[in-house]
Image: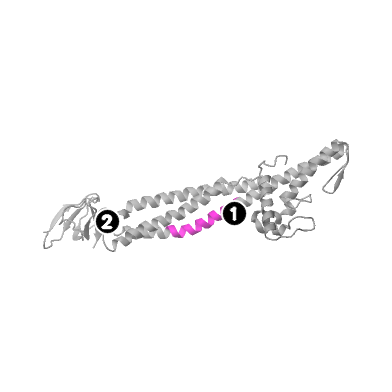
Amino acid sequence: MADAKKETHSPTAGSSISAHREAAKWIVASAAAVGALLVAGLEFADIGRLAALRDWLWVWFLAGLGATLVGLYYIYGVIEAGAAVMAGQSLSLSDLLVSELEAEQSAMKRGAELDESGRIPVASVAAEDPLLGRLYDARESLFRGTSARSPGGLHDLFLATHEGLRTLDRGAAAHVDGLAYQPDAEGRAELRRYLHHLESLEAGLIGYAAMIGSRGSYDTLRRRLRNSAGVVVVVIAIVAVASSHGVDVDDVAEPTAVVVYPVGTGGGDICFGEADGRSGWVMPGSWERPVVVMEPTIDCPAESASVDTDDYVLIPD
């Protein structure tokens, strides 16, 4: 209590905060892994090669790319919320006093009237700051054994107790929190015990406030995780459907009808892979250089060749 900037958490609050951080650590790691798999899956599916194609194939390119970006956005939201839980919120009595002062000033601007003791009513202050509202709701346990009903009241009692000890040292009786203390050994010991009680209340107050903040951050993380789960499943489905518009020759067990499109300027043969696509049959073989048999046209005879998939895309016919 002697140092208003001192940070301390009660054992119960500390264990709760540690549990939230441990859970958040695993959630963030899992979300990062899903994001990495999503990016890797997009590259493996080769969605980008559909962008070089014509007509409706643009739809699948945009669907795959857009779905991936949406999925990564939701995953980022989970990671951001998890990082907030792991980082925690640094709190001290000074922080609570500043928050209470700002809430009182805000309440006064809104027209709140002073109570009989000359202070802003607790309900008006709580309406300005939800954290203070939670502290006020638990004031019977947080400020037990004292007349304090707020962080500011607890701090005032602390200052009054220190002043009371100085009064006792001067040989005069001291009055603290409605009680009289005599300037003898017993009076000093009793007032010091009361000071230690105030310090323990401070520790409990800061710990309880930190636990509320950690729980709020963890609840935000859980909401984002629930919202992201369904979105990521839909994203994976869209990417899978988009990627199905290309042929992976390694999975072809029998000749499969395809349309061959050149990609960019790589496909230079005007017959083998015309700009508008040319029908053919792909044979089982290597994905890097599959063998394709082209159907004859008026200008181009039937032919077969090993296709470089960096130059051509094979679309199921």
Q: Which dot, 1 or 2, sits closer to the camera?
A: 2
The image shows residue 12, relative to residue 123, as above or below, that is above
Name the residue: 86% across, 40% down: 187
**4 relative position to 275: left or right:** right
Q: Residues within 10 Å of mark 2 (few under 14, many from 20)?
A: some
Residue 255, x across and y down, in percent: 20, 59
The circle drawn on residue 52 is 2
Q: Amino acid at mark 2?
A: Ala
Task: Tell me where the magenta segment starts and ends, as one range.
Answer: 214-232
Q: Amino acid at mark 1?
A: Gly
Q: Residues within 10 Å of mark 1 (few under 14, many from 20)?
A: some
Residue 95, x across and y down, in percent: 66, 46
- The verdict on residue 225 being magenta is yes
Mark pair 1, 2: CA separation: 47 Å
Number of labelled discs?
2
Name the residue: 47% across, 58% down: 229
Q: Secondary structure at mark 1?
A: helix
Q: Residue 188's image quarter?
A: top right
The circle drawn on residue 216 is 1
User: Of residues 188 and 246, which is closer to you in this image?
Assistant: 188
Q: Residue 315's image quarter?
A: bottom left
Q: Main secondary structure of the magenta part?
A: helix
**312 relative position to 38: left or right:** left
Name the residue: 49% across, 53% down: 78
Mark 1 touches mark 2? (CB < 8 Å)? no
Residue 13, x across and y down, in percent: 65, 48
Residue 245, x across and y down, in percent: 29, 60
User: Of residues 261 and 230, which is closer to you in this image?
Assistant: 261
- The verdict on residue 281 being magenta is no
Q: Secondary structure at mark 2?
A: helix
Nearer the N terminus, badge 1 or badge 2? 2
Quarter the N terminus occupies: top right
